[in-house]
């Protein structure tokens, strides 16, 4: 969450539809593929007439013929692969959507998986570009240089003085936005410490970090905002914050839930996690007014919302059954 001086791409994920020859969209697509196969057959026939036939006639060079025929077969296989690949590419004729969002694990994991399903179901490639520094996302869009179709961003988040979607609406980059997912903030504590609220941290040791990575300033910002009387241990990374609590060098720290879950020590039996509901960050999604593919972008947004709603419903049902 620490802001960097300039735009910095954290990760680019390009999701292509999985090609399936049994699901060619139309007769015209099948005709294109058939034309490639006919062309391939013609090339192989010409190759045989001009090279393979002459080699087979020359019986006195049997040992050379065997090696050359093998070479011809290998060449034919390579040509077959090239033609088939090109044919499939033409038949699929993929469109592409570009999604711009923050460098958080939920976007890189859950949203990525749903986007791949959308890509497969609709034959549309999805480019997910994650950027360090949420303010930079809004700035890039307002400069009209992003070429994005969809944006995922917070509406507002006072802890970091962020108001991404509000800025985009004010700048006429979007008309409206819809809630997509909420990122939890967890208070990570040692189980042998009597800590259940932020107020209980007074007089304790809290692990923080100020390194320029996503989520780095979270613990430090919360300590300052709550005006907590704590001793700070400055660690080298977010994972090092967690390790400091596990090892006993710190009594507590604060981490984003998706980040915490990605670390090996997240399942350590000596620690507990507490949901800090007042610090949750709500993320929204919107189709950009400058999108070159507005119809496809709207379908993508609907698909994400429906999939996340279904997942939430499944989780609630599982909890009820248990």
Image (spheres, rainbow, N blue to C red):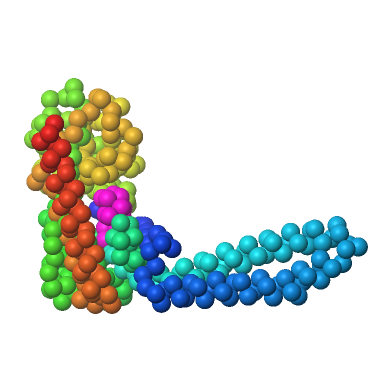
280 to the left or right of 240: left
72 to the left or right of 196: right
- Residue 189 in the magenta stretch? The answer is no
At horizontal 12% and vertical 41% (from top left) the residue drawn is 316
Position in image of residue 242 (x %, y %)? 28, 35
Residue 292, quarter of the rendered image: bottom left
- Residue 112 in the magenta stretch? The answer is yes
User: Which sits in the foreground, 321 or 247?
Assistant: 321
Quadrant placement of the C terminus:
top left
Return the residue found at the far top: 192
Position in image of residue 294 (x %, y %)? 23, 74
Residue 223, quarter of the rendered image: top left
Position in image of residue 108 (x %, y %)? 31, 53
What residue range appears in magenta? 101-115
At horizontal 18% and vertical 66% (from top left) the residue drawn is 286
Against 210, residue 50 (above or below) is: below
Q: Main secondary structure of the magenta part?
A: helix
At horizontal 28% and vertical 64% (from top left) the residue drawn is 100
User: Which sits in the foreground, 222 or 149?
Assistant: 149
């Amino acid at each position: 969450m620490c802001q960097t001086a300039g735009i910095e791409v954290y990760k680019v994920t390009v999701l292509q539809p999985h090609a399936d020859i049994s699901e060619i969209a139309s007769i015209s697509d099948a005709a294109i593929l058939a034309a490639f196969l006919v062309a391939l057959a013609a090339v192989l026939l010409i190759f045989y007439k001009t090279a393979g036939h002459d080699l087979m006639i020359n019986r006195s060079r049997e040992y050379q013929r065997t090696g050359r025929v093998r070479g011809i077969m290998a060449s034919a296989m390579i040509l077959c692969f090239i033609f088939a690949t090109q044919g499939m590419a033409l038949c699929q004729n993929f469109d592409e959507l570009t999604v711009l969002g923050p460098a958080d694990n939920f976007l890189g994991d859950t949203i990525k998986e749903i986007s791949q399903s959308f890509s497969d179901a609709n034959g549309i490639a999805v480019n997910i570009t994650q950027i360090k520094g949420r303010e930079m996302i809004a700035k890039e869009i307002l400069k009209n240089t992003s070429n994005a179709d969809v944006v995922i961003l917070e509406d507002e988040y006072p802890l970091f003085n962020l108001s991404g979607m509000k800025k985009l609406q004010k700048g006429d980059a979007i008309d409206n936005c819809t809630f997509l997912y909420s990122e939890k903030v967890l208070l990570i504590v040692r189980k042998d410490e009597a800590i259940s609220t932020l107020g209980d941290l007074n007089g304790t040791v809290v692990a923080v970090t100020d390194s320029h990575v996503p989520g780095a300033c979270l613990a430090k910002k919360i300590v300052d905002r709550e005006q907590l009387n704590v001793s700070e241990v400055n660690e080298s990374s977010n994972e090092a914050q967690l390790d400091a609590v596990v090892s006993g060098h710190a009594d507590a720290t604060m981490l984003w839930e998706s980040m915490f879950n990605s670390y090996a020590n997240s399942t350590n039996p000596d620690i507990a996690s507490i949901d800090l509901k007042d610090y949750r960050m709500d993320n929204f999604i919107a189709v950009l007014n400058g999108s070159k593919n507005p119809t496809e972008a709207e379908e993508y947004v609907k698909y994400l919302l429906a999939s996340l709603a279904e997942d939430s419903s499944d989780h609630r049902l599982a909890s009820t059954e248990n």
